[in-house]
Amino acid sequence: MGPRRPAELYRAPFPLYALQIHPRHGLALAAGGGGAARTGVRNGLHFLQLERIGGRLSASLLHCHDTETRATMTMALAGDLIAAGQDASCHLLRFCLHRPEQRDGGTSDGGSKAGGVGKGPWKRKVSGPSEKGEGETRSETGEVTVETLCSVQTDFSPDALQKAVCVSADNTLLATGGADGFLRVWEFPSMKKVLEFKAHDGEIEDIALGPDNKVVTAGRDCQCCVWQRDQLVLELRWNENMPAVPDQTYRYQACRFGTVPDQAEALRLYTVQVPQKRGRRPPPCYLTKWDGKSFLPLLSQPCGNEVVSCLSVSDSGTFLGLGTVTGSIAIFVSFSLQRLYYVKEAHGIVVTDVAFLPESQRGRELLATNEAALLSVAVDSRCKLHLLPPPAQLPHWAAAVAVCCAHWGHHPAAAAGLPGLPVAPRHQRGPHSASSPGRALPLLAGARAHVNCRGRVPAPAALPEPLETDWPVSAQPGEGRGAPSRSLAAIKTGVCVAHPPVCAPGALPVKSCLLSWGSAPAAPGPRTPPAASSSEQQSGWETPRPPPPPPAARGLH
């Protein structure tokens, strides 16, 4: 059985470059186009209504806004205002969503007439209450109207192009950057310029507005800077604890602020570093987590050998979404920067933007029982959906894998949920098991297992190929089948689920693998694994060790 592919929500008549999701209306705004070239490819901004139909998330076209000869390359959303970067300018648009009862002479059925692209709204037939199925969230929305408020020039280089736009959290400031390397800050929505200075020697790739009006800029000159107005506060160095990585080897591609779950005052900054040059053996890209107030690096992890093109952070700050230039999509958990979801070449070409479904009331209705939903757009004109299912929907074969925990013990009753698990002798249990039998942890839809980390458990009868879209995936990029795998439930509970290959008939070696949960890492940079014997280093898996001698025998030596 081949890997499952993500669902295709929408296909536009032009390449897509920017994506935003309205948290209150449940609208997806996808924009792009063919630019000013006379290729016959139009330019536009499409409004898509997201809704659940038949238990699945779907999208239907509401309105097509024609942007004439300008393709929208970047976009920021603040309420009902849209800041769209088109060529060398930023266009400020306002859209209004008309309810069926608000339309002049409109009825609740909405009609079924369709307008041409760029010539007006596309009116959908709205289902009545009797037509709604269980679990559906059809919205009785009518039509969308769009008006242009103003436009300002934001780039003055010979090849002028606005490459980044960002709105502050309180929707009072807007920052733009482009090919000329200048950072420009505007009052929003009046678009009165309040600040302009040279931030980078090259192009500005991304901008993030943080607390106290601090601005973070990522440029092609291998620098990522923190600014307080036009004063340089700090120049970030993600590799200061990685002396083997030279400064000019990597450049910053993206930067995003995110909240911390269950910590209202905490803030994190996430950056992506990509190699400056690509060789026959491309080096990995890196994902770095920073303290959002002191801007000290907390953790850096490799995120794959494919060059990352875009980054998104979920509303709660729990998940990070990445798109690559080869069309792949990945979702990471923000706490440990471990990969939870990966689909290779989900799009046929470079992914231009990704966005998580908002965690507002409307967003939770659309999510249903899923943990998160990520939308992606690419130059292939497609908008695709990537879902993280709840932990209870993990594959059944994963219930046969071993579980390691911090107590290093074995509870005989814990194996009741997994028939056939052997009971380890008492002398092979962890140090805490002599006085306490240890604690059994729930695993995969109610099954319980708590086995000794150095023991051996029976192999399942048939271990299918892991799917690329299943939750358990390789913990590190580049690891093949048989490497330790981690699920969301494992990461949240501090349990590592291993999926090793069968190395002996009827037995599985269990890799000792622990995750720390609930505390920050002691120091930034990659973690150092514990020392292993020469045989373990060759095989990659720990071998069973003989039991220690009895206490009486120890005194004779």
Image (cartoon, helix red, strand yellow):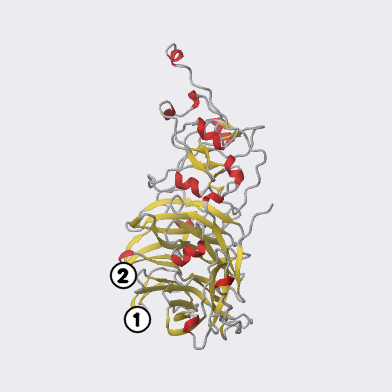
Q: Position of residue 250 (x, y in %)?
A: 48, 57
Q: Amino acid at mark 2?
A: Arg
Q: Secondary structure at mark 1?
A: loop
Residue 393 showing in the rendered view: yes
Residue located beneath label 2 in the image: 229
The residue positioned 47% from the left and 65% from the top of the image is 363
Q: Is residue 114 above or below residue 298?
A: below
Q: Is residue 309 visible?
A: no
Quarter-of-image position of residue 444 = top right
Front-lying residue, 403 or 223: 403
Horizontal arrangement in the rendering, residue 277 relative to residue 256 (left or right):
right
- Residue 506 image offset from top left, x and y in percent: 65, 32
Q: Is residue 335 left or right of residue 280?
A: left
Q: Are marks 2 and 1 in contact (CB under 8 Å)?
A: no
Name the residue tied to disc 1. 192
User: Is residue 527 or residue 158 the one in the foreground?
Assistant: 527
Q: Residue furthest bottom?
A: 105
| Coordinates of residue 554 in the picture (x, y in percent) | 44, 15
Pinpoint residue 438: horizontal percent, then vertical percent.
44, 33
For the C terminus, give its image quadrant: top left
